[in-house]
Amino acid sequence: MIWLRKWSLALVFISTGLANGGEFAVGSRSNSGILPVSGTGQIVSAPLGNPASLTPIPSQPTGSLSNPVTVPPLTGTQPYLSPAQTAPIAGTQNPINGAGDCCGPIGGDGPINYNLYGFGGASFVFGSGALVDVLKTGWTAGTGARSLFFDVAGDAAWSVDVHGFYTFNRGTTPPPVVINGGKQASIFRLHRTAVGVGFGREWFSSLGYVGVPEGTLRGGLDVGYRLGTGHADFRPLGDPTGYTRVHSIFGQAFVGGHVSVDVPMGDWTFTSGVRTEYNHTHWRSIYPGGSNLQGLTVGLFLGARF
């Protein structure tokens, strides 16, 4: 009967545990367990049987960070830079003294300008020879176009010039008498028309292709050669109204220099200055006894540069 008493004692203990809320039941938890309260972000502790007496336990906030982390930009993106922060494109120039933008992208060298001009002045003859002795001081006029190839610094340029001109000289008084076509005659007019090309160097007191509002001083030297045609008018002795014309071609070498002022006028530049030139003309045949002629031209020129 001893085993019956043991089983009876075990049943008493089991029933007592069930009566006290199942503290010793398999799978049960203590009535002072810890439970989360939904939506509060806190952990509370309270007996399971009395929800009204829930006591908050200090805890950490959920869903936020005390020190936010800065997210770097996406790979391959760049921050926006204003025009003032961006570097200029290689080979370009910034506006100078409010004169406006430069002529565009430059590249490895400076920009190219184009100069159209007209000129006029006095034509002096000198030296030795029969032709020099029979001519007075005359005048010359012409027009031309010049390209300026600027250095990177912008204060100097190489130049290539193409031009044409007309020069007129009268004969001396009293005219010397020569033999022309087997007759005695005197020269009373000499006409010359030619085209030429020159190469030179220009210097500017500031950035020549931009200029400054008050103007830019400019100086230059050039050399070149011309080919032309001309004729001399002879007056037969004893026939004041008649004349004989002798025609010939000629070549002319020259070297010259000029000084000018360039004034910006918005999209173009006004140029004006003084030019002096020495030239040597060789006629194939224009005057008996000698056809070579040395000359000096001094005049003014006006133009526009783009």
Image (cartoon, rainbow, N blue to C red):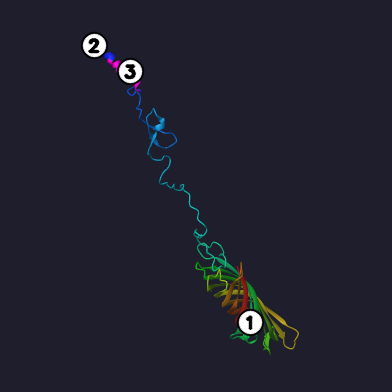
What element does badge 1 sit on?
A: strand
Q: Position of residue 207 (x, y in %)?
A: 53, 70
Residue 2's disc number:
2
Give the mark, 1 or 2, whose residue is nearer the N terminus.
2
Residue holding disc 1: 122
Q: Residue furthest bottom?
A: 174
Spatial CA distance of label 1 from label 2 is 157 Å
Overall secondary structure of the magenta section: helix
Residue 34's disc number:
none
Identify residue type, mark 3. Answer: Ser
Q: Is residue 179 a member of the stretch shown in magenta?
A: no
Q: Is residue 24 above or below residue 134?
A: above
What element does badge 2 sit on?
A: helix
Observer-nearest residue: 67 or 111? 67
For the N terminus, which image quadrant? Answer: top left
Q: Is residue 25 above or below residue 278?
A: above
Identify residue type, mark 2. Answer: Ile
Q: Judge whether residue 149 can be spotted in this image.
A: yes
Give the mark, 2 or 3, whose residue is nearer the N terminus.
2
Identify residue type, mark 1. Answer: Ala
Residue holding disc 3: 15
Instruction: Select label 3 or label 1 by which is in front.
Output: 3
What element does badge 3 sit on?
A: helix
Q: Position of residue 136 (x, y in %)?
A: 65, 85
Q: Position of residue 93 (x, y in %)?
A: 52, 64
Q: Is residue 105 above or below residue 220?
A: above
Picture quadrant where residue 249 is located: bottom right
Give the mark, 3 or 1, whose residue is nearer the N terminus.
3
Observer-nearest residue: 217 or 165? 217
